[in-house]
Image: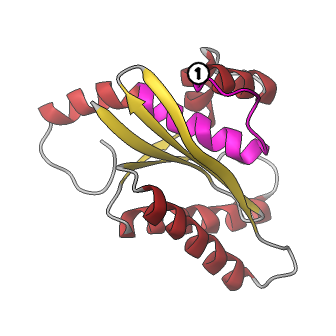
Amino acid sequence: MRSRIVGIDPGLGRMGYGVVDADGTRLTAVAYGCFETPAAMPLPDRLLELYNRLSGVLTRYQPQVAAVEELFFYRNTTTAFAVGQARGVAVLAAVQAGLRVAEYTPLQVKQAVSGYGKADKHQVQEMVRLLLQLPQRPTPDDAADALAVAICHAHAAPLAEAVVRTLPPQSGRWP
């Protein structure tokens, strides 16, 4: 069964997106890129810019589901709060577009794409290139990460859907 997935690598300065079509085990990159907001721009304006740009991608490519990377920070709480706000904007845009939202940790994404939960960025980018049959590694890193999140969901979705069919109905989150 064919589905279109948008993967999102949330960030305030740079938010990556990747749109992937999944048809069984065949994966095809539809579009990918990165939105950037200048550090000098006030925070509310940056969040609005991210929301508007992501909403445009969702309108243009019409995915059925959004896969968003969960945050993992252990050093800078100020950065974590700002990225968390950007992540909230991404989830809001997806839900307002009528999409289910799946969330994956960086470890889950690396495991799904490379088979190794501690793979480095270059290993993940190369596997994204191979799985999507791209002529070169996708850039920038944020776009490659977003494609990896979409691939992770493509691999996880069949099992998650089977589990969902056995549970009582829930709204919003995947599963």
Residue drawn at (71%, 56%) of the image: 34
Camera-nearest residue between 153 and 164: 153
Q: Is residue 139 magenta?
A: yes
Magenta-drawn segment: 132-155
Farthest residue, direction front: 135
Residue 170 appears left or right of 59: left
From what the image shows, is residue 39 above or below residue 31? below
Point out residue 86 in the picture as x, y percentages from the top left corner. Answer: 63, 66
From what the image shows, is residue 60 above or below residue 17? below
Residue 14 appears left or right of 175: right
Residue 106 appears left or right of 118: left
Q: Is residue 106 visible?
A: yes
Residue drawn at (67%, 40%) of the image: 145
**For the stretch drawn in magenta, what is the main secondary structure?**
helix
Farthest residue, direction top: 115
Point out residue 28 in the picture as x, y percentages from the top left corner. Answer: 51, 32
Point out residue 107 in the picture as x, y percentages from the top left corner. Answer: 61, 29
Point out residue 6 in the picture as x, y percentages from the top left corner. Answer: 49, 48
Query: Which quarter of the figure is the N terminus placed in?
Result: top left
Question: Mark 1 sits on what residue?
Answer: 131
